[in-house]
Every structure is written in structure tokens, then in C-alpha cells.
Image (cartoon, rainbow, N blue to C red):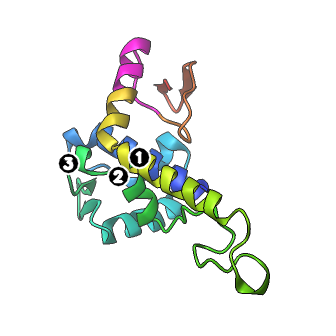
């Protein structure tokens, strides 16, 4: 499996959105600032997430993004697929021509099985699970929700007159 920055950032941004949408639409500029993800990169990701009906946008003052479905109905696999991340450990992309003479390589079945396990796992984890875990961490730390590249930063950092906890 090759999970790239695109997939990690999409999942991180979706958690941030889910944590904050109860106060209305969430701006990409806000997510960008909190998560240290380029605004233009987020615009690309959210365009794909919107086309896959995972988020919806609201234009105008007070606009931004909200989830298009309940958190429990959005799996990590849904998010990763929406941003065009391949979840494939085989060399051939599942075409079974990874060996000599366009035949399967000796380890094709191993990697294909790994693909099934990865997809099953990512399908079993939904956004609700991730948000609840993040809220539990926040409650333990007594801080604000900040996820920087999916990692937790345990110390408060002063930034633009705002204390950020991760």
C-alpha cells in the first residue's frame, strides 16, 4: 500500500471539519491554518471530496464546508478513494501481469490479500470513531482540537495570539 500525503491530509482535514461543523460551515482557510496544509492543496482535495458527496459547500459570508453525510456513514476508505489514492500493494495494479510474460508474479496473491485486509480495515473505521478518539484526547489534555498532519503535539504552542494544543 502506498498511502501518500494526499490521503493523510484528506483524512486529517475531514476530522478537523467534523470536529468544528456544529458551529456552522468550516472554512478551508481555518483548516489550512490549524493543520498546516496548503490552502490550494485543500481546495483540490475538497473539490474531490465534494464530487464524491462527502462534503457540501456553502457560498458567501459565513460559508465553508460541512459533511454531506453523518460521520458514522463516512469511512476512511471513502475519504481515501475520493481523493484518488490507490490502495494497492501489487506491482501490476491488480491486472495480474506483474511477472514475466505478462503473467502473475509469485507473490501476487500475497499482495492481493494484503489489499483486501487494508481495504476491509479502512472500511471498518469511520469518521465518527476518529472524532470521538480526538475528543477524548482533547478532554484528557484540556485543550483545543488541533491535529497537525494526523499527529498529536502534546505541548501548547503560542501562535498568532492563540494557544494551540494537539
Q: Could you say whether the residue bearing mark 1 is in a helix, strand or loop?
A: helix
Near-viewer residue (153 or 84): 84
Query: Real-space Cα distance between discs 1 and 3?
Result: 22 Å
Q: Which mark is residue 2?
A: none
Left or right: where 44 falls relative to 74: right
Identify residue for label 3.
70
Left or right: where 3 falls relative to 23: right
Q: Residue at x 47, y 68 (%)?
A: 44
Q: Residue at x 41, y 46 (%)?
A: 30
> Is 8 located above or below residue 99 in the figure?
above
First in residue order: circle 1 vs circle 3: 1
Q: For the magenta stretch, what is the residue range? A: 135-146
Near-viewer residue (61 or 92): 92
Residue 153 part of the magenta-drawn span: no
Residue positioned most to the bottom: 101
Q: Residue at x 42, y 20 (%)?
A: 137
Q: Could you say whether the residue bearing mark 2 is in a helix, strand or loop?
A: loop
Residue positioned most to the right: 100
> Is 36 located above or below residue 162 in the figure?
below
The x and y percentages for residue 20 are 29, 39
Query: Cβ–Cβ below 8 Å for labels 1 and 3?
Result: no
First in residue order: circle 2 vs circle 3: 2
Q: Residue at x 58, y 62 (%)?
A: 112
The x and y percentages for residue 81 are 44, 64
Q: Could you say whether the residue bearing mark 3 is in a helix, strand or loop?
A: loop
The x and y percentages for residue 13 are 43, 48
Snapshot quadrant of residue 110: bottom right
Q: Which mark is residue 27?
A: 2
Query: Real-space Cα distance between discs 2 and 1?
Result: 5 Å
Name the mark nearer the viewer: 1 or 3. Answer: 3
User: Which of the image's four quarters has the N terminus?
Assistant: bottom right
Query: Cβ–Cβ below 8 Å for labels 2 and 1?
Result: yes
Amino acid at each position: 500500500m502506498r498511502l501518500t500525503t494526499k490521503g493523510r491530509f484528506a483524512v486529517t482535514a475531514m476530522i478537523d471539519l467534523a470536529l468544528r461543523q456544529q458551529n456552522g460551515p468550516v472554512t478551508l482557510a481555518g483548516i489550512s491554518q490549524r493543520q498546516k496544509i496548503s490552502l490550494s492543496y485543500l481546495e483540490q482535495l475538497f473539490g474531490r471530496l465534494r464530487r464524491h458527496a462527502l462534503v457540501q459547500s456553502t457560498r458567501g459570508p459565513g460559508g465553508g464546508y460541512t459533511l454531506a453525510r453523518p460521520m458514522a456513514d463516512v469511512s476512511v476508505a471513502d475519504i481515501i478513494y475520493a481523493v484518488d489514492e490507490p490502495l494497492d500493494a501489487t506491482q501490476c495494479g491488480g491486472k495480474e501481469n506483474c511477472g514475466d510474460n505478462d503473467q502473475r508474479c509469485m507473490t501476487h496473491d500475497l499482495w492481493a490479500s494484503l489489499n483486501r485486509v487494508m481495504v476491509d480495515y479502512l472500511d471498518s473505521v469511520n469518521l465518527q470513531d476518529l472524532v470521538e478518539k480526538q475528543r477524548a484526547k482533547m478532554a484528557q489534555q484540556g485543550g483545543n482540537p488541533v491535529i497537525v498532519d494526523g499527529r498529536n503535539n502534546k505541548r501548547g504552542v503560542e501562535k498568532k495570539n492563540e494557544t494551540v494544543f494537539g
